[in-house]
């Protein structure tokens, strides 16, 4: 599908601000999906912005701060800077590391560091970055974020989580603006557990990994080889962090087989990746979907998905049955 227009927009939860329904996940620009060239990363951000994508997702750990620096340098001095919404995260940086990351001093320092790298006076959104459940339960880190919000250091705060139990726990926090969750054709649990509750609390849902680490892009084969620094190489079975962050928690070979099984369901006029993104966007509880992109053409293809028509109800039902029968029993790790 050819696409040159502006991305459709959705309301960002409690505020009046609207953001693009398709955002740009910037993690892949920091070698989590293999080598990344800065010039190409800049070109990709520019292409995304040209297409009306104005929601950029980063974190202080991506490239150990280099990703935030790249975005800050790119946006610095733009006359339209206020158009763009940059969401970052804190909590996983190795300095000082766990559990010291969750003290008032560390939360404040990490916030100041992000402000400096992004070259702004206030962060649009900062999110706890898949922190330990006991830290979510204590609520102290959220109180520190409320303090920073009152001081004008951050405009809003949210939580990036790995399980629905964690999502529901964070929903209890006053002033929580957003939840970032894994949601895709292979991870449908949020539909039943989270969507209605988040909508009732007016909490935005930011969808990460909509393509299940590339499985739902439709191009991976069982014998695919990934770069050494690509998380699909070093975390395939959850060796370094939650297995659900890689291939939706599915064993890779079975994930390829499952993706191949649904290729025949993709409607004409769209790629499999666009089909997977459109599936996510069909749920109105979703605020924005943040597929990664490392090249300008990927950004263009992703943006095009938001212009596609909704998928037929019958196809949604068919994909739900496929998930229940074939996919859900294979998902590993907390979910």
Image (cartoon, grey):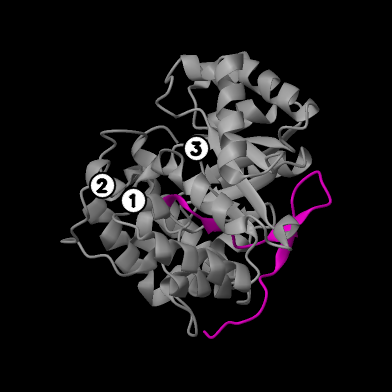
Mark 1 crowdedness (10 Å alpha carbons): few <14, some 14-19, many ≥20: some
Is residue 260 toward the left or the right of residue 307 in the image?
left
Mark sitting on residue 229: 2
Report the residue marked by disc 1.
Answer: 31
* Residue 193 visible at all: no
Question: Does 19 lie within the magenta span?
Answer: yes
First in sequence: mark 1 or mark 2? 1
Q: Residue at x 55, y 68 (%)?
A: 46
**x and y percent of residue 299 in the render?**
50, 69
Q: State which quadrant residue 4 falls in.
A: bottom right
Q: Which residues are magenta?
A: 1-27
Is residue 50 toward the left or the right of residue 293 in the image?
right
**Element type where label 3 sits in the image:** loop
Q: Residue at x 72, y 26 (%)?
A: 148
Mark sitting on residue 60: 3
- Cβ atoms at labels 1 and 2 below 8 Å apart: yes
């Amino acid at each position: 599908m050819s696409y040159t227009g502006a991305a459709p927009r959705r309301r960002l939860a409690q505020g009046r601000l609207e953001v693009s329904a398709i955002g740009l996940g910037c993690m892949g620009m920091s070698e989590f999906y293999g080598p990344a060239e800065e010039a190409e990363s800049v070109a990709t951000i520019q292409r995304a912005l040209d297409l009306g994508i104005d929601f950029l997702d980063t974190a202080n750990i991506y490239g150990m701060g280099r990703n935030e620096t790249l975005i800050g340098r790119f946006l610095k001095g733009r006359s339209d800077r206020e158009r763009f919404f940059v969401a970052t995260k804190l909590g996983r940086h190795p300095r000082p590391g766990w559990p010291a990351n969750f003290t008032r001093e560390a939360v404040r320092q990490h916030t100041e560091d992000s402000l400096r790298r992004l070259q702004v006076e206030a962060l649009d959104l900062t999110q706890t970055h898949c922190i330990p459940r006991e830290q979510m339960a204590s609520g102290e880190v959220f109180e520190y974020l409320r303090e920073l919000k009152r001081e004008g250091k951050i405009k809003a705060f949210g939580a990036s989580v790995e399980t629905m139990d964690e999502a529901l726990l964070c929903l209890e926090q006053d002033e929580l603006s957003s939840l970032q969750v894994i949601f895709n054709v292979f991870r449908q649990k949020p539909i039943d557990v989270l969507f209605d509750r988040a909508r009732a609390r007016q909490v935005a849902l930011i969808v990460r990994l909509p393509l299940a680490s590339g499985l739902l892009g439709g191009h991976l084969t069982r014998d695919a080889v990934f770069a050494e620094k690509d998380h699909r190489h070093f975390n395939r079975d959850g060796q370094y962090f939650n297995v659900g962050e890689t291939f939706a928690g599915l064993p890779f070979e079975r994930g390829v087989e499952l993706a191949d099984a649904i290729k025949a369901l993709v409607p004409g006029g769209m790629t499999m990746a666009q089909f997977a993104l459109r599936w996510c966007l069909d749920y109105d509880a979703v605020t924005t979907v943040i597929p990664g992109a490392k090249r300008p053409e990927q950004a263009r293809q992703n943006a095009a998905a938001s212009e596609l028509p909704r998928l037929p109800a019958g196809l949604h039902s068919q994909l739900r049955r496929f998930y229940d029968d074939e996919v859900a029993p294979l998902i590993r790790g907390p979910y």
